[in-house]
Amino acid sequence: MNNALDPMVRAWITLLDSAEVLRRTAPSRDPGACDRVGQAVDLLLRHEHSMTDAQRELARRTVWLRDNPEPLPDDRATWGRCNCPTCTLARLRKGVMSR
Ligand SMILES: [Zn+2]
């Protein structure tokens, strides 16, 4: 991985990749494996919450460029967004309130 990258961004990518490996290799009927995937996702989202919008955008852009042969999608409006449960709930509440 690019060592010049912001350490916060690098850590996010490492957490994302390890959650993905756990998810892909988890035996489907093993509740322990399921817990470990959940813990890895929790860790990823907790880290994501401590990042800035610009760091989250850069992290998603870096992963996209690494994993996709296509050019970046035009709509990247949500790439800076934090997807942790607290921020997701806050966005939902805001949406409901502004109705
Ligand atoms: Zn958050």
Image (spheres, helix red, strand yellow):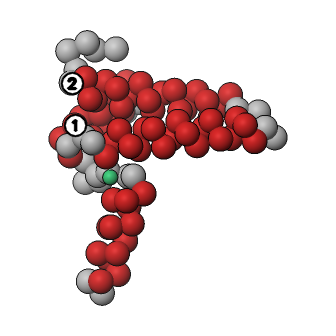
SS for tag 2?
loop
Could you tell me how far apart the alpha carbons at marks 1 and 2 are, in whole angstroms? 8 Å
Q: Is residue 88 visible?
A: yes
Quadrant of res 51: top left
Nearest to the observer: residue 24 or residue 89: 89
- What's under tag 2, amino acid-wise? Asp
Which of the pair 27/32 is nearer the observer?
32
Q: Nearer the viewer, residue 62 or 68?
A: 62
The location of residue 12, given as percent across then percent down, is 36, 31
Point out residue 81 in the picture as x, y percentages from the top left corner. 29, 52
State the residue at coordinates (38%, 43%): 46
Q: Secondary structure at mark 1?
A: helix
Residue 53 lies left or right of residue 26; in this view the side is left
Find residue 67 and report its horizontal and vertical position in percent. Answer: 42, 27
Taking the spot 20% from the left edge, 46% from the top edge, the residue there is 53
x then y, percent, for residue 4: 20, 15
Q: Amino acid at mark 1?
A: Gln
Q: Determine whether label 1 and label 2 are within 8 Å by CB.
A: yes
- For marks 1 and 2 on the same chain, the one whose residue lies earlier in the sequence: 2
Residue 3 sits above or below residue 94 on the image: above
Identify which residue is drawn at 34% across, 26% down.
11
| Image disc number at residue 55 | 1
Residue matched to label 2: 6
Mark 1 surroundings within 10 Å by alpha-carbon count, few (fewer than 14), some (14 through 19), many (20 or more): many
